[in-house]
Image (tube, rainbow, N blue to C red):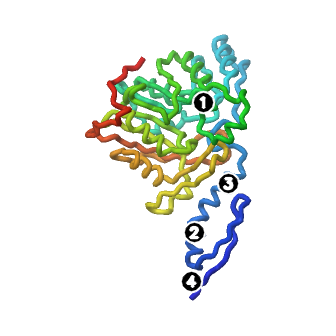
Amino acid sequence: MADTMVRRRRLRIAGFEIALGVEERQARRIRRLAAPVLRLFGRAAQSSAPLDLPGTRATLDPSAYVSPPARAIAERVQGVDWYHVIELPHGVVTPGYVDHRAIRDRYCLPADMHGMRVLEVATFDGFWAFEMERRGAVVVATDIPSWFHADIPLRTLERMAPDEDTPTGAGFRLAHELLGSRVERRTVSVYDLSPHDLGTFDMVFVSDLMLHLRDPQRALERIYPMLKPGGFLLLAEPYNPELEGLGNTAMTQFFGFYQYIWSVPSTMTLRTMLQVAGFDTVDEVARLPLVYHHPFPVEKVIFRARRSSDDTAAPAHARTTEVSAR
């Protein structure tokens, strides 16, 4: 009898009060399912910075470098707002917000990438593009041209001042020059990727992008035809550990553009989205933390998703001959 009683509860979330009238048995189930989401939401709401976008960074003191070449590089580095920690010549290291160096091998990149043509989507300062080039790959790296092209709500964009529309790529260009890199950087949104413009690739690499997109499913569907038949996507994305106890249920926490974040999915959601995008096999290869300057922990999952070697068909807009790297 107790399980059939209708209990009326009031639930307050982020300033909104919701009245619920449910059977006690259903109420207990809702509480079990909702508790992980509410705990994560509560922690995130107390944070004043986004999960993995620039916040408080380390600084660089050029005077700390003894040799004139190192000091000259450090002075140039000091003038850039860095996202990635990148090792440059003469022992100079950029004061980035995210440091992938200690766990780069856990991202499951091939150790030897000679003979591979690789696309990195949303390269930012280029840490991964330069790393894949170091392993022997020919790399094309893409990013949006300026911050007004970021995937943000229209009402937010309307309130932004013109001087906030700064070009992207300052860190990439400086690191590219100092490293003597041959990575080709192209300015294009993930939503506008096309084999007609860039050709196709043996591998596509994407890291820390999906949570910043309002339509990550469409993004994955635009990435799919960028791969040659038999090629694979390496997707390294934050996930919500609190949603992992729900079996095969694909759950996502929607932040609604909280501090540049649209949503944080479960690993099952990411796996399902990759399958919907058309990938033939989807394998989880690693879970690891994001190493960055922020007290709020972020866990990541890495999937290797392959385009079938038998899938030679392409959408009409994607039928093209191979484009050689410049």
Rounded to the nearest angstrom, the CA distance separating label 4 from label 1 is 56 Å
Looking at the rendered structure, the number of numbered marks drawn on it comes to 4
Q: Earlier in the sequence, mark 1 or mark 2?
A: 2
Q: Where is residue 154 in the image (x, y as percent from the top left)?
A: 64, 40
Q: Can you see residue 202? A: no
Q: Quarter of the image holding residue 155?
A: top right
| Mark 4 or 2, nearer chain start | 4
Q: Position of residue 272 (x, y in %)?
A: 43, 52
Q: Residues within 10 Å of mark 1 (few under 14, many from 20)?
A: many
Q: Is residue 185 at all visible to an observer of this figure?
A: yes
Provide the residue designation for mark 2. 32
Alpha carbon distance from label 4 to label 2? 16 Å
Residue 306: image x %, image y %? 35, 41
Query: Tag 4 or tag 3, which sits nearer the N-term?
Result: 4
- Specify the amino acid type for callout 3: Arg
Q: Is mark 4 on a helix, strand or loop?
A: helix
Disc 4: which residue: 3
Tell me the tag on residue 239.
none
* Mark 1 residue type: Val
Residue at mark 3 to residue at mark 2: CA–CA distance: 18 Å
- Residue at the spot of label 1: 85
Disc 2 secondary structure class? helix
Q: Quadrant of residue 291?
A: top right
Q: Residue at x 37, y 32 (%)?
A: 318
Mark 4: few/some/many CA within 10 Å (<14, 14-19, 20+): few
- Please name the amino acid that badge 4 sits on: Asp
Residue sitting farthest toward the bottom: 1
Q: Which amino acid does label 2 sit on?
A: Arg
**Which residue is pictured at 54% across the width and 46% down the height?**
238
Q: Residue 43 carries which label?
A: 3
